[in-house]
Amino acid sequence: MTLLSVKNLGKAFRAYRSEWIRFARWVGIPLKPSNEKWVLKHISFDIFPGQAIGIVGQNGAGKSTLLKMITGTLQPTEGHILVSGRIAAILELGMGFNPDLTGRQNVMHAAGLMGFSNDEIYKAIPWIEDFAEIGNYFDQPVRTYSSGMQMRVAFSVATAFRPEILIVDEALSVGDTYFQHKSFDRIREFQKEGTALLIVSHDRSSIQSLCDRAILLEKGSVIKDGEPEEVMDFYNALIAEKENSTVKVEYNERGKAKTSSGTGEATITEVVMLNEQGQIAEYIGVGEEVSLRIKVAVHRPIETLVLGYGVKDRLGQVIYGTNTWHTKQVIRHPSVGAEYEFIISFLANLGVGSYSVEIALTDKDTHLTANYEWRNHAYVFSVVNMSKAEFVGLAWIQPQISISNKKVETISQGVAS
């Protein structure tokens, strides 16, 4: 069953020399506007129960325009949208709250606009108040709220009743970490019950943890549609390479996309992982001491060379990352024609699973100023448990566990090893 179907959707903003020309177009006379700008064109996708799609793209790509058309606040110029079920949307902070009304009054008004009866609203208000956790402010004017408090109330009223489709447009980014976790738990509950999610976010972890598909918009068109990790890697490469001329996507023998970009003043010539015996390894043990060896060649004069790396899990979320800017090991005026070797040693205190390494060569602490080379999936390795007590999770955090009661000070002590 399709909950939302978007077919060949497009939106153009038009200017007319006179209102008579505008009226003529309304009645079907094909007169041309004096100015026409397309902000979205040829957008198509379907979303099914329980599915989550992330919409990503730089500012001005058309993300918010797309969501406004889906929710019916903006009419498309071409194409059509078919919706099965109720849509709940958090598109803008406050959802049109009246600043002079209290949170409780705004909740009643907003829920009424969503089509719920007074009885349904009165039954839901205790839950909304409890979920928002803003205390006495719930009965204070909204103009006294912080942006985070507004978001709490807005999210609570939007999710008080389970919708068939939930749309979130960056609203959660203004909240505190505690409420973000609470909100994501609520969203996951809805997904398990069949709610479809459409989320716009620049937060890689949100897209990759919630979504099973991502769509990248650029200048109003879809330029990438696929697995969240692959799409987010491509998106980050576009940001790093502003001209978009050096972004390359290749696929390894496992079918994983390897995205790279860069201007080429310095390039990566070798990436290997060495185990405790100094041997190149694709399988390493939990807690084993390993070394990541990276060789970099300098081809043209540059002021500074910084190497950054990140270890990512199978979903593409960075477990740990840093660079030589932060470790105060910047290479200044590197020699043209020279090859530099970086050895990064660490304990692989990781959970069992597959991991990858991404690498960036930049001039400072970020690739946004100069991107010599950025390479995703530069090295792939697996972690296996060969000597530790059984555990679950992404990290090996060795515990000491003590057990005691009132009669006997210590029953036992144990160390996971």
Image: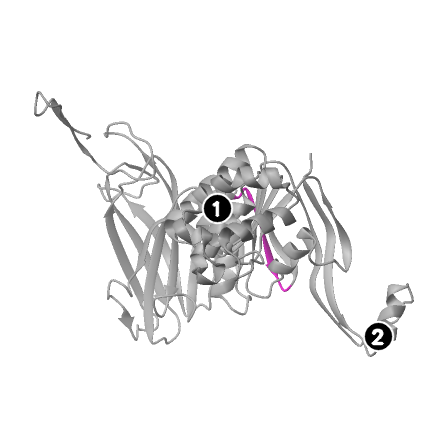
- Mark 1 → mark 2, Cα distance in angstroms: 47 Å
Which color scheme is applied? Answer: one colour
Crowding around mark 1 (Cα neighbors within 10 Å: few <14, some 14 to 19, many 20+) is many
For badge 2, the amino acid type reads Glu
For badge 1, the amino acid type reads Gln
Q: Please count the marks in the image.
A: 2
Please state which of residues 3 and 374 is positioned toward the viewer in this rendering. Answer: 3
Q: Quadrant of residue 360?
A: bottom left
Q: Quadrant of the C terminus?
A: top left
Closer to the chain start, of discs 1 and 2, is 2
> Magenta includes 212?
yes
Residue at point 49% right, 66% down? 241
Is 322 situated above or below 36?
above
Image position of 195 (left or right of 232): right
Q: Which residue is mark 1?
A: 208
> Magenta includes 410?
no
The answer to whether residue 41 is visible is yes
Residue 320: % across, % down: 32, 50
Q: Nearer the viewer, mark 1 or mark 2?
A: 2
- The label number, if any, that marks residue 19 in the structure image: 2
Q: SS for tag 1?
A: helix
Residue at point 37% right, 76% down? 301
> In this picture, which residue range is highlighted in magenta?
211-219
Please state which of residues 372 and 34 is positioned toward the viewer in this rendering. Answer: 34
Q: Magenta segment, principal secondary structure? A: strand
Crowding around mark 2 (Cα neighbors within 10 Å: few <14, some 14 to 19, many 20+) is few
Image position of 9 (left or right of 281): right
